[in-house]
Amino acid sequence: MPDALVADLRAALAPERVLAEPLELTLYARDAGIIEGHAHVVCFPLTTGEVQACVRIARAHGRPFTPRGSGTGLAGGAVPVEDPVVIVTTKMDRILEVDEEDRVAWVEPGVLNLDLTHSVAHLGLHYAPDPSSQQSCTVGGNVATNSGGPHCLLYGVTSAHVLAIEVVLADGSVALLGGVDAEPAGYDLRGAFVGSEGTMGIATRIAVRLTPTPPAVRTLLLDFLSVEGAAATVTGIIAAGIVPAALEMMDAEITRAVEDFVHAGFPRDAAAVLLVEVDGLPAGVEAAAQVVADVGRVHGARSTRVAADEAERALLWKGRKSAFGAIARIAPNYYLHDAVVPRTRLVEVLSRVYEIAARHRLVMMNVFHAGDGNLHPLIVFDRRENGVMERVTAAGEEIITACVEAGGVLSGEHGIGLEKRDYMPLIFGEADLDAQARLRHAFDPDGVANPTKVLPAGSRCGDLQRVPEGAWI
């Protein structure tokens, strides 16, 4: 016999769109990271009105709620804590309107990132933010974490491409944040909401900016016999006045794993490779590609391969974006970090990352957005091994600390969630945390929207909590 909360949700939605069996709840206990929690019930609304109903019913029964998209996040943002109602928006997957002239699309939060680009490709447009999980991540999830991606070096992260958001607030009311006008009136509440990880409400409609597809593109693969040479090339390209559309780096371990998985022609004996893409008008693209090749040669690039056609370009990008799938051939689990460091300190920080991994007896790989210093140290492991989780989490803490000490920040695109929440004081002082907590309180006075995420408990008074109730690693 279902409890009253489950019964009310099934009456408001439909029985088949409300899950409450133990096995069903287990499937929604975690995101793509390593932290697990527990949900009281999981529901799948189809409309803004149904999202409102889920929120109001949760409130009536004294339960918090946790928004969830495809669950591809890596920081625990969608992990259910305090037995919440998990509100999954993946069935809200309609592209509502496309304005070709103004280059704006209104979409529901469950639209997959890559599906949006495919739907407007015939108009010569695309959606620029491109996380590696773009085949499966949702636009709503991208908004929640302010997702990035390889091409955000030139085009900017999600916040640069979101114009307006319809939001169901923590009391069940609906608000429209931002607008499609060039200069919407009032405070930039849209900007405050993007990246709030579900702590300020649930996005139900999103107006996104569409970007013209560039007339010419060149994709280059440079390989090096040293990590130092690859890192120096990254800095040299930017110093030469070139801002590529994408500038990605992979070390030896991940390059071999990717090549064994995708067979794209990545050199298995390279210490590091750079995947560089330049786009724009044909003459400018050719000139920029030549500069990239020249800078690479100065810094010891062994070879420079230019994709001959769209098929070869797609294969190279498949290799980069399949990196996290490729490591499944090595071990069943991984822990992926997301800190940002100054480009000029890449080599120094990478050296510390490798040292930390060796000291904790862990396999470490690196694949990251080198152009903006967004590191993704990837620890590959088998959580069934006795004591390995303690080593993994200890190494993770040291990696974060090393990045911050080098002048970096906690996250470039994955968000804070639960994973990095307790490290927020490394970056923000008491006054900073207090200001963020006050903003969150303005949207959610009762603290029921995705509780315990992002801000340490007691941010208003400095009383920090280390372990969130109901979550474990």
Image (cartoon, rainbow, N blue to C red):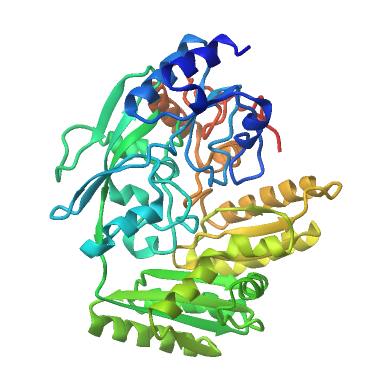
The quadrant in which residue 336 appears is bottom right
Q: Is residue 94 visible?
A: yes
Compared across the picture, whether 382 is left or right of 145 comes to right
Q: Position of residue 213 (x, y in %)?
A: 26, 67
Compared across the picture, whether 362 is left or right of 413 comes to right
Reply above or below: 237 against 332: below
Q: Is residue 450 visible?
A: no
The quadrant in which residue 306 appears is bottom left
Quadrant of the frame with the C terminus = top right
Compared across the picture, whether 263 is left or right of 129 comes to right
Residue appearing at x 27%, y 26% in the figure: 175
Reply above or below: 398 against 431: below
Along the line of sight, which residue is nearer the eye, 87 or 389? 87
Q: Position of residue 18 (x, y in %)?
A: 52, 25
The quadrant in which residue 375 appears is bottom right
Compared across the picture, whether 265 is left or right of 121 comes to right
Q: Say how many tags the image has.
A: 0
Along the line of sight, which residue is nearer the eye, 73 or 9? 9
Q: Position of residue 418 (x, y in %)?
A: 59, 37
Q: Position of residue 350 (x, y in %)?
A: 62, 66
Along the line of sight, which residue is nearer the eye, 370 or 307? 307
Residue appearing at x 56%, y 28% in the figure: 452
Quadrant of the frame with the N terminus = top right
Reply above or below: 429 against 362: above
Residue appearing at x 48%, y 13% in the figure: 8
